[in-house]
C-alpha cells in the first residue's frame, strides 16, 4: 500500500474542502442580506475550519512529497475514495462545532450531531438533526449555506471533481470506476477524463439553469442556490423548516410552478448523467432507448398512480402539507367541534375551490393568522382539489425514488399501501451514474431478469439463455455480483437496525404513547433511509420531524450507514480488513 501517494490525494481533498468553505462567507455581508450580529460566529467557524483544512492538506502534501511512484493501483484507489469521504465528513463538521451552531435554540450541536449533519451533506442523504434552520440564532446563514454546499460537493463526488483537476490517465480511470458504481463498464463514452468533464458540465449546467428559473419565480438568490444544490445532488437539505411545503403555504409565490420545476430537476438528477450529457450534445435517442431510464420513468408513473388512487380512497390528502399553514384558503366560518358543542355549518372556500370535508384534528388559526391559545379544537379536514393532490404525489414519488428527500406533504401519515410503495422506492433508488441513492434501477432490472432465467431453468434445465440488456450480453459473473450486492445491502440494513434497536432508548416512543412495534418500524425506516441516502423517514423521523431525537451513538451508527450507502458498501467495508492494508 503506497501510503504517501494516498496522502497526496487526501491533501487535495482537504484543500478543496477548505477553499469551498470560504464561499459561504459572502452571505455574512450586508449586500447579501447578512446581519453581523447573527453571522459573526458563523464567519469565525468557517475561517478557522478553512485554515485547519488547508493546513491539514499541506501536511498531507509534505508527508507524500518523497513519493516517486505516481501509479494509483486498485487498492490505493479504494483507499483514496473511502478515506476521502471519511475525511470530508470530519472536516465538514468543523464549521458546526467551531461556530457553536445549535440543533435547537439553546441546545448546542454535539460532536455526533455535527458528524451526522456533515456526513448527511456529503453523502447527499439530507437527514438532519437541526430543528430550526430558519432561525439565524440557531444556525447562521453562512453555516446554512455551507450545509447545502456539502451537497454540491458530494453530489457528483469529490473524486470526479479532482479527477478533472488532475487528469491522470489510469489514476482518473481507477477512481471514476469506483465512484460511478453500477453501469460504469458499459458507459458509452470511452475516455474517463472526457467523461468526468462531461459529467461536471452537466452537473454545473443543471445547477445554473435551476437557479435562474427559481430566481425568475421570485425565489431569493440564497434560497434558489441552496435548493438547487440540494436538488441536483438529490440531497434534500432545505432552507425552510417545512421543506418545499413552505412555498405551498406562501400566497405570494406560485408554489405549483416552483414544485413542478423541482420535480423536473429531481427526475433529471436521478437519470444517468452520461445519458444527459449525450442528450445535451445532440444524441437524445440514446436516452429514450436506454432500458434503465425507461424503467425508471415507468416506475415513477406506476407508483404515482397507485399512491394517488389509494390516497384518494383513504382520504390522505388535505390542505395541510408540511407547514402548519394551509395550502389553500380556509372558509370564513370553520366547522369546529369544541366542548361537545354543535358543529357550525361550512361556507364555500374563498379561493373558489370546491372542497369536501371530513373530521380530523388540526391547528386552528384566527383571522389574524395567530393560533388560538389554550384550546383544543377539532376542525374539518379539507380535501384539496385532485390536481393539487396529484402534484403532491408526483413530487413525493420523485423525491423518494431519487433519494432527494424534499417534502411537501406528511407522506408518513399516508395509508399502508402508499407507505409500502414508498419503502420500495427508497430501496430501488434512481439510475446508475446519477446522484441518486438506493441499489439503482439497473441492478433491479438484472435481478428480475435473472429470476426469470432461474424460473425457466426449473422446467427447461437444458436451455442455456444469455441475458441481454440493450442488445449487449450480461456476463453471468455480473448477474451473480449484483444478486450478492442486493443481498449484502439488505443484510446490512437488517444488522444496523438491530444495533440501533438495542441501544436506542424506548422513551422517544413511549413518551408519545407509541408502541414497541412502531419503534421497530421507525428504526427500520431510518436505517433504510440512511443506506439509501434518502434522508426522509417515517414516524419520529418523518416529514415534519428529523433525527434529532435519536441518541448520539445511534446518530454515529446512522452516519456510518450513510457513508456505506454512498460508497455502495464494498469500498467502505474493505477499509476495516487488515489484509487490505498489508504490503503487496
Image (spheres, rainbow, N blue to C red):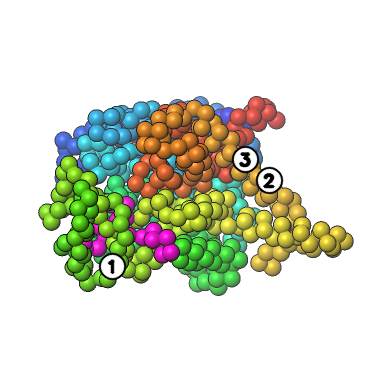
SS category of the residue bearing label 3: helix
Residue annotated with mark 3: 491
Kindly identify the residue that appears in the image at 59 percent across and 35 percent down. 495
Q: Residue at x 27, y 71 (%)?
A: 354
Location of residue 30 (image quadrant) = top left
Indicate which disc residue 484 carries: 2
In the rendered image, residue 315 lying in the magenta stretch gets the answer yes
255 left or right, relative to 570: left
Residue 463 pos. (x, y %): 84, 63
**Rounded to the nearest whole Å, what is the CA distance between mark 2 and mark 3?**
10 Å
Point out the frontmost of discs 2 and 3: 3
Q: Is residue 325 left or right of residue 416?
A: left
Q: Position of residue 111 (x, y in %)?
A: 38, 27
Extent of the magenta region: 312-330
- Image quarter where the N terminus lies is top right
Query: Could you give the CA–CA distance between mark 1 and mark 2, rounded to whole angstroms?
Result: 50 Å
Which one is earlier in the sequence, the residue at label 3 or at label 1? 1
User: For mark 1, what is the residue?
Assistant: 355
Amino acid at each position: 500500500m503506497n501510503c504517501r501517494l494516498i496522502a497526496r490525494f487526501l491533501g487535495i481533498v482537504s484543500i478543496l474542502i477548505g477553499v469551498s468553505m470560504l464561499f459561504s462567507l459572502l452571505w455574512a455581508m450586508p449586500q447579501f442580506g447578512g446581519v453581523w450580529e447573527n453571522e459573526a460566529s458563523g464567519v469565525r467557524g468557517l475561517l478557522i475550519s478553512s485554515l485547519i483544512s488547508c493546513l491539514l492538506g499541506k501536511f498531507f502534501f509534505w508527508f507524500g512529497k518523497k513519493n516517486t511512484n505516481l501509479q494509483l493501483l486498485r487498492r490505493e484507489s479504494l483507499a483514496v475514495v473511502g478515506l476521502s469521504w471519511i475525511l470530508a465528513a470530519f472536516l465538514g463538521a468543523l464549521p458546526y462545532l467551531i461556530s457553536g451552531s445549535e440543533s435547537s435554540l439553546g441546545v448546542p450541536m454535539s460532536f455526533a450531531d455535527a458528524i451526522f449533519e456533515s456526513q448527511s451533506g456529503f453523502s447527499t442523504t439530507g437527514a438532519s438533526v437541526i430543528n430550526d434552520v430558519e432561525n439565524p440564532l440557531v444556525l447562521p446563514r453562512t453555516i446554512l449555506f455551507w450545509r447545502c454546499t456539502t451537497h454540491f460537493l458530494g453530489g457528483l463526488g469529490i473524486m470526479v471533481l479532482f479527477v478533472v483537476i488532475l487528469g491522470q490517465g489510469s489514476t482518473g480511470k481507477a477512481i471514476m470506476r469506483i465512484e460511478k458504481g453500477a453501469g460504469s463498464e458499459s458507459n458509452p463514452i470511452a475516455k474517463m477524463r472526457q467523461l468526468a468533464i462531461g459529467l461536471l458540465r452537466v452537473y454545473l449546467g443543471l445547477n445554473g439553469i435551476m437557479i435562474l428559473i427559481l430566481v425568475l419565480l421570485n425565489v431569493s438568490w440564497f434560497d434558489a442556490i441552496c435548493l438547487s444544490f440540494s436538488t441536483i445532488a438529490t440531497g434534500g437539505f432545505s432552507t425552510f423548516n417545512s421543506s418545499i411545503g413552505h412555498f405551498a403555504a406562501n400566497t405570494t409565490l406560485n408554489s405549483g410552478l416552483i414544485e413542478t420545476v423541482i420535480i423536473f430537476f429531481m427526475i433529471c438528477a436521478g437519470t444517468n448523467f452520461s445519458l444527459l450529457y449525450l442528450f445535451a450534445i445532440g444524441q437524445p435517442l440514446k436516452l429514450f432507448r436506454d432500458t434503465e431510464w425507461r424503467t425508471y420513468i415507468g416506475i415513477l408513473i406506476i407508483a404515482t398512480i397507485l399512491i394517488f388512487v389509494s390516497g384518494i380512497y383513504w382520504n390522505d390528502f388535505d390542505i395541510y402539507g408540511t407547514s402548519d399553514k394551509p395550502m389553500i384558503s380556509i372558509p370564513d366560518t370553520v366547522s369546529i367541534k369544541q366542548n361537545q358543542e354543535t358543529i357550525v355549518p361550512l361556507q364555500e372556500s374563498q379561493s373558489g375551490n370546491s372542497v369536501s370535508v371530513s373530521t380530523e384534528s388540526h391547528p386552528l388559526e384566527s383571522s389574524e393568522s395567530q393560533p388560538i391559545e389554550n384550546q383544543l379544537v377539532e376542525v374539518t379536514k379539507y380535501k384539496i382539489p385532485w390536481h393539487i393532490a396529484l402534484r403532491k404525489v408526483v413530487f413525493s414519488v420523485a423525491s423518494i425514488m431519487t433519494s432527494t428527500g424534499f417534502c411537501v406533504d406528511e407522506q408518513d401519515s399516508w395509508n399502508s399501501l402508499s407507505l409500502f410503495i414508498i419503502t420500495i422506492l427508497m430501496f430501488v433508488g434512481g439510475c446508475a451514474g446519477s446522484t441518486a441513492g438506493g441499489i439503482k434501477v439497473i441492478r433491479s432490472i438484472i435481478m428480475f431478469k435473472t429470476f426469470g432465467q432461474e424460473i425457466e431453468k426449473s422446467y427447461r434445465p437444458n436451455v442455456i439463455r444469455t441475458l441481454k440488456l440493450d442488445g449487449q450480453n450480461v456476463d453471468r459473473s455480473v448477474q451473480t455480483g449484483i444478486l450478492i450486492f442486493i443481498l449484502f445491502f439488505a443484510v446490512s440494513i437488517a444488522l444496523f437496525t438491530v444495533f440501533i434497536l438495542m441501544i436506542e432508548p424506548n422513551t422517544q416512543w413511549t413518551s408519545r404513547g407509541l408502541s414497541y412495534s412502531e419503534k421497530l418500524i421507525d428504526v427500520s425506516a431510518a436505517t433504510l433511509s440512511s443506506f439509501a441516502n434518502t434522508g426522509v423517514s417515517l414516524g419520529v423521523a418523518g416529514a415534519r420531524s428529523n433525527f434529532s431525537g435519536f441518541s448520539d451513538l445511534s446518530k454515529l451508527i446512522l452516519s456510518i450507514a450513510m457513508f456505506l450507502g454512498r460508497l455502495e458498501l464494498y469500498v467502505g467495508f474493505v477499509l476495516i480488513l487488515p489484509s487490505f492494508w498489508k504490503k503487496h
